[in-house]
Amino acid sequence: MKELRAKPKKRISTKERILAVSKILFLKQGYSETGLNQIVAEANTVKASLYQHFKSKEELGKTVLLLYSDENLLLLKELMKKYPKPMDFVLAWMRILKREARKVNLFGCPMANFRSQIANGSPEILSSIHNVTKATIATLTLYLEQAKEAGYIPSHSNPSKDARFLFLAYEGVLQIWRMSGDIRLLDDLVEIAQRIFEFKPRTT
């Protein structure tokens, strides 16, 4: 009888460790407040190894930003697939934001955080922020177009404009929550969405 052996754990590469540490530090401390020395120390590596994978802090920041974008868009698409009705989608989105806020895992929108901390002399990151913003709004627009065709939002709705307003509402409630520390303000995302889609609040 063969002896059962546990499968060895997959080894995390140096590049993966650097990205994981950078993502946490950039979100918690801010891009401008995080130095490469701290990153390599917490990733248990050396600066020479970091430069083998990323030619500069800007390139590292751009990569981390794109990782966040991929994760965020994946989450939105999963919610959109599960909730074809926009208000159900927004309610689920808001619940996730509040859950992350309670777990102290919500630090605002990384795109907005990065943009507020970098100078115009970081063209690669600026370009990434612009592209991520466009991709997010495009994803919301396509979803609202489908919702309009299904009759889930008014026939006179403008999906492109409503997508921009919804993205603006998301960014706004995150910033106000960060400034006030009042988690209840994240609920405003739902009320704003109701106004965007011209729905009256549900009565209980």
Image: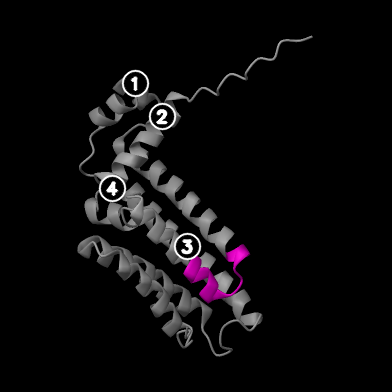
Residue highlighted by disc 1: 45
Single out the mark in the foreground, 2 or 3.
2
Q: Is residue 35 above or below residue 93?
A: above
Of pointers 1 and 3, the one earlier in the residue sequence: 1
Residue appearing at x 40%, y 35% in the figure: 19
Amino acid under disc 1: Thr
> Is residue 81 covered in magenta?
yes
Left or right: 126 as drawn, with respect to 75: left
Q: Is residue 167 above or below residue 1?
A: below
Residue appearing at x 28%, y 48% in the figure: 122
Amino acid under disc 3: Thr
Q: Residues within 10 Å of mark 4 (few under 14, many from 20)?
A: some
What is the span of residues highlighted in magenta in the rendered image?
A: 80-92
Q: Which mark is residue 136?
A: 3
Of pointers 2 and 4, the one earlier in the residue sequence: 2
Say which element carries label 3: helix
Residue highlighted by disc 4: 122
Q: Which mark is residue 17?
A: 2
